[in-house]
Amino acid sequence: MIKQIFLDMDGTLLDDKGVVTKDTVAAIKNSQIPVTLVSARAPQEMTFAIHDLALQAPQVAFNGGLIYQMDEGDMHVLQAYPIEAATSIKLIHWLAEMFPTVSLSYYTQDSWLVDHASAEIDREVLFTGVVPRYAALSEAALQGQNGIFKIMLIDLSETKLDMIQQAILNLDLPGINVQQSDASHLEITSDIAEKAFGVSYIIAREQLSQAETAAFGDGQNDLSMFYKVGTSIAMGNAPMSVQQSANYVTKTNVANGVAYGIEHFLLHQP
């Protein structure tokens, strides 16, 4: 019997307009199974889904860099793993110097910070509903001391991120995880920040067995989460390598794949 569901957001829970459909909301609520969102997103970009689904369980942001629980609108941090301060500051300034034409921004626990407006940032605002705070790049030093959880690069041409990712890896900086969440987004977090970490923490906290857990995802960064749960479900829009790593494949994110997966693969388990 499934007692906990872990859900990726973009490409999984959310449709291509970035919303949770009415059918998906109904299926999750009707299942009465606690749900944890496990996302590369910042907490403020997850709030609408937590509200729409009336979620009470702990949630996972920044791919596992921040684990928190909402209580009447207040966020209670359970675990926090920002990038080491010196590393985040060095990396932000290096990226700005080496790749000035690529959109660069970064996240603290409470804010999304950028140093100038761009088409990439405007597109992100439209999709997430979150408005950034504009700050000079020199402020990164102060924010690094307070805790930077994610550095993000956006390339709408989808041609530069492979090269940039390899360049970052060649720096051999300690304590970072560098992943492309999709073809236009490159995200740097703490090396502790993997979805598997967030899932394992909640399984232990809630005293669940592996067999009592399930996860839905569509990307390579969801595979570590799949390996920690008893039932893994890939979206129909996921790459074939992700689909082949899952126990089941459901419909796409624009065809209420999460709702279909819950109803057909989870609710009738013994």
Image (spheres, rainbow, N blue to C red):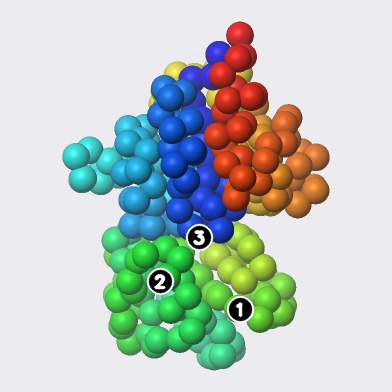
Tell me the crowding category of disc 2: few under 14, some 14 to 19, or many 20 or more residues within 10 angstroms, Cα based: some
Q: Is residue 209 above or below residue 167?
A: above
Image position, residue 197 (x, y; %): 53, 40
Name, please, the residue furthest toward the top. Answer: 270
Residue tagged 2:
125
Disc 1 is placed on an element classified as loop
Q: Is residue 103 left or right of residue 144?
A: right
Q: What's the mark number on residue 17? A: 3
- Choose mark 1 or mark 3, whichever is in front: 3
Locate the N terminus by quadrant: top right
What amino acid type should be assigned to the residue bearing mark 1?
Leu
Q: Quadrant of residue 36?
A: top left
- Choose mark 2 or mark 3, whichever is in front: 3
Disc 2 is placed on an element classified as helix
Q: Identify the mark nearer the N-term, 2 or 3.
A: 3
Image position, residue 9 (x, y; %): 51, 49
Image position, residue 267 (x, y; %): 56, 19
Residue at the image point whose x is 68% and y is 76% from the top? 158
